[in-house]
Image: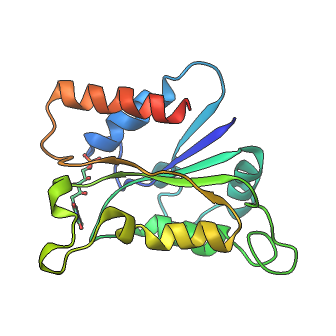
Amino acid sequence: MKTLVLVFHPDLKNRSNANAALAKAASAMPGDAVTVRDEYALYPDGRIDVAAEQRLVEEHDRIVLQFPLYWYSAPALLKEWEDQVLAYGWAYGDGGEALNGKELTVALTAGGPASEYQHDDGGATIDEVLAPYRMTARYTHAVWGEPFTVFRSMELADDELAAAGEAYRAFLGR
Ligand SMILES: Cc1cc2nc3c(=O)[nH]c(=O)nc-3n(C[C@H](O)[C@H](O)[C@H](O)COP(=O)(O)O)c2cc1C
């Protein structure tokens, strides 16, 4: 199983604890089964190399979209990536079956605690927040995988970050 981890954090190098720890743990996995890419560093001007991204997706069996939760959604480049890369005739429509049978899932860090993501007082669960990704998997005939989530992402001590990295490696190694 070849896994592609696409990290969408606006400044993974300088302004990230949680996503940087996860990306580092994923990058240190042995062999070439896991490819990790810092998408904002690759495309600082937001101009995505669509052909290169599509080729990478084609070469992998599992696509993990990793990002910090921003306003119950993702940093803007991930939306741009979806709009550009998941093109008509490639991801859907007119023979577009590039994701057919691949696993698509999300690795998410959230500043809030898990208890914040439930139905009391008009709230929503993380599964509900992630509905656009689940629906995208469904529409492109990908298999929606169980998401990986890290809560309280801004409060994690070093040992908690290390544990999250280990859990992520186990998740990616499945
Ligand atoms: C613009 C912005 C919006 C955010 N929105 C949310 C949110 O809707 N829910 C939440 O739990 N955390 C939210 N956060 C907190 C981020 O999820 C948190 O900073 C991130 O997971 C930390 O990861 P990092 O250390 O890799 O930057 C937001 C942070 C920013 C900067």
- Lateral position of residue 26 relative to residue 97, left or right: left
Counting from the top left corner in percent of width and height, residue 105 is at: 53, 54
According to the image, what is the colour scheme of the structure?
Answer: rainbow
- Lateral position of residue 101 relative to residue 111, left or right: right
- Compared to residue 56, the image places residue 127 above or below, namely below
Can you name the residue that lies furthest to the right here?
95
Residue at (80% x, 80% y) in the render: 93
- Compared to residue 165, the image places residue 114 above or below, namely below
Can you name the residue that lies furthest to the front here?
120
Quadrant of residue 34 in the image?
top right
Residue at (74% x, 56% y) in the render: 101
Counting from the top left corner in percent of width and height, residue 133 is at: 51, 67
Where is the C terminus found, in terms of image quarters?
Answer: top right
Quadrant of residue 144 in the image?
bottom right
Looking at the image, which is closer to me, 103 or 15? 103
Residue at (20% x, 75% y) in the render: 123
Whether residue 74 is visible here, answered yes or no, is no
- Lateral position of residue 97 relative to residue 45, left or right: right
Can you name the residue that lies furthest to the top here?
30
Quadrant location of ligand 1? bottom left
- Compared to residue 41, the image places residue 72 above or below, namely below
Counting from the top left corner in percent of width and height, residue 30 is at: 57, 18
Residue at (48% x, 73% y) in the render: 132
Where is the N terminus found, in terms of image quarters?
Answer: top right
Q: How many marks?
A: 0
Whether residue 126 is visible here, answered yes or no, is yes
Counting from the top left corner in percent of width and height, residue 89 is at: 82, 76
